[in-house]
Amino acid sequence: MRLDFWNSSIVRRIRYVFVAGALALFVSVGNLLSPIDLVSWTFQAKVGDHPLSGDIVFVEVPETVLEDPIESDTLRRSIDALDDAGADAIYLDLARLEPNTPHVSEQLIERISASDRVFSVGRHFIDRNRDRIIFPSRSVLGDAKRVVAVHEPDFLGFVWRVPTSVIVNGVEYDSFSRSLAGLESEDSIEIDYHFDASDVPVLTAETVQDALETEGYAVGKAFVFGYPPGASDVAIDLPGSLAAPQSYVAIFAAETLKRGGMLRVGAHLRDYVPFLCFCIITILISIPFGKRSRRIGYAMALAGSIFVVVGPIFLPFRTGGAAGYFFLSAYALQCAIHSWRSRLNLQSAETGLPTLQRLEKDIEALPRASRKVLVAAKLHNFSEVMATLPASSKVEYFHTVVKRLRVADTSLTVYSNGSDRLLWLQEFETQETVRSHLVALLSIFKSPLRLDGKPIDISITCGADFNFGGEGHRRISLAEALTDKTSLSAQPILFGAEPDGADEEWQVSLQSKIDAALEANEIYPVFQPQVAVDGRRIVGFEGLVRWNDSKRGLISPSYFVEQCEQAGRMEKLQQFMLRECIRRFMNSSALQTDAWLSINVSATLLADTWLTQLVSHVLDETGFPAHRLVLEITETAKIHDYQTASAVLGALADLGVELSLDDFGTGSAGLENFFRLPFSELKVDRLFTASVTESNKAREIVGNAISLGKSLGVRVIVEGVEDERTLSILSSMGCEYAQGFLFGKPDYDLSAFETCEVQWLKSS
């Protein structure tokens, strides 16, 4: 399994889920989302409309009923009449928080005390963190049975749940709501407010007698005597009905029980838990199975959100949805930010063309059986042309070039990062048809462009990559590298991997061949010393890969390493070389010196964080000192994403590892890479070293490289030193470090170099 799995889109989305879930849980635990749920429940209550049973009648009495003798007598006569008419129960919800001066008749007190159908309703409240209940005094309502109304309103003033009983000072009182319903309920009562307050049957103490003229009117009914909604300290707000009598809370709770009750989903946990868990699980399950699965998961989560809002209007349940909404919003926001950033990276701000990052995604999205040739065109004299064009003409220049590239296919998608490379994908028929098409393009570009009425010479060379099914960033690197090897005069078109033949067969089975060769110890490292010129002291060793195939014999590293790069198969080989070189080095006497160990790393591995994680893991695993490890970046493939490469190399440097630019001065290993990437060492290519004894130009190039390194505080190692004359010239230039056959050929055994220093000193 690749170590960059954590960068995959699957794990990215899973990370989004956990971040969004953690945020939702945090704000929910702090009740920060409760207002959203309360507003949602209020909306549901206003929209719904359930019929009332009609078994509970509210009898409105004036606020002074217990103070005015006449009104008190009217109350007594109403209670007498209802009791005699067979009312199931009579509730006197007449407790007041404000003090009053009772003035009731003895006949009322006696009547109340004598009846087992009359209940006195007390009001529960908390005073100085202590539970208290206010009942009308015995001098008012005598020895009536007692029930308690418990109201705990939310910040909107609404009561959503009432208990079935309450214990105060060791005495348990039955709930007003449960007693009123005449039904048992073990749990607290969720109040369904899908009732219209105006449907509650309402009488007054004066009209009770009139109502009882209807035969059997009181039978099976409960009557609640209470104050009107205008009473100053006893009015309460109901969802959908403001300033209702406080008795209506108990009436609606009792009506809810009569309808079968209302389910509070999550009541035993927290309201937000069930729907939040549903959202998290739904999204998590949908992520690993592709885009279609994710869309189904998103649709299910959206449907769940709608159901949580709309469902309680028609079904008897209530639950908290705000945490789930917050989670979905946080998850969607993270996805949207990623998408927005991706879109910014997928279209060049300079040209308006899709970028190479977009090309990489498009290549990865190709069907497995697709046979698309990746073509890269290099615009020659690009820098000179850009320097002469005004800003307004630069975009026009790109679009004019693209128009020519589309001469055979007007719908062709051309990709660019605003540099001198333009890339596109085209169908493969035969190698010859691809070549013919590119030859025709080259002919078209022989004609000058005209911008602002001025002719501009333009010429291109092309590289074509045939690695069907290869990884996107590898194919882009290889196609661009091919253009570096082209020339206008000698080789304007260059093909990479052949579409058929022995090389393709080799690539198809390359990984298995490498696996078998590693298993059989046919692939192994050899070491070559790096020497301080002054004193000829060994200061380091470079680990070089070798492959002695049982059938092909010695295979040139330049061949099979490049084949591995083209096929995107460098990881296993790189991992082996890093581990084996460090293991061999640590088991030798070189570990006891100050010598460093250099290991080649392919530039194709700078496209993601896999290399950083590998190096970090191996250093931790072996205990090898990071400052003694030098990673030489070899560039048989061009770096096309400098931002990622710089981040990877920066992370390696943070580990303490030294970074070296190998083969400096050739191919892609030029000043641009040295300028843009954090190298601490340059290695001058043997191409120049081999000619310093004969060529003034070679001496100038090597001398300038040495001077450049010294002025910037960067170590310079000159490769390819094979004789004393070359070493003498390099020494006169100020060369401090060298490597080559003069000091020893690559050898499997590090101990072979232990006596070299003595021999060099004698010979010098």
Image: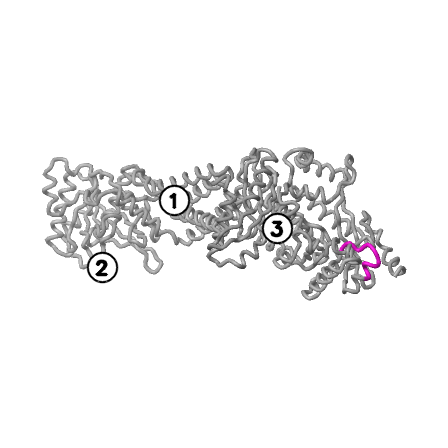
Magenta part of the chain: 719-728
- Element type at mark 1: loop
- The residue where tag 3 is placed is 639
Is any part of residue 297 visible from this angle?
A: yes
From the viewer's perspective, is 403 left or right of 254?
Answer: right
Q: Mark 1 points at which residue?
A: 267
* Amino acid on which the number 1 mark rests in the picture: Ala
Name the secondary structure under disc 3.
Answer: loop
- Crowdedness near tag 1: few (<14), some (14–19) or many (≥20) residues, C-alpha within 10 Å: some
Quadrant that contains the C terminus:
bottom right
**Residue 186, x across and y down, in percent:** 35, 41
- Select label 1 or label 2 by which is in front: 1
Distance from Cα at disc 1 to Cα at disc 2: 34 Å
| Secondary structure type for disc 2 | loop
- Residue 161 in view of the camera: no
Q: Are marks 3 and 2 in contact (CB under 8 Å)?
A: no
Say which of 274 and 692 sits in front. Answer: 692
Q: Is residue 13 above or below residue 506?
A: below
Residues at marks 3 and 2, CA–CA distance in whole angstroms: 83 Å
The type of residue carrying mark 3 is: Ile
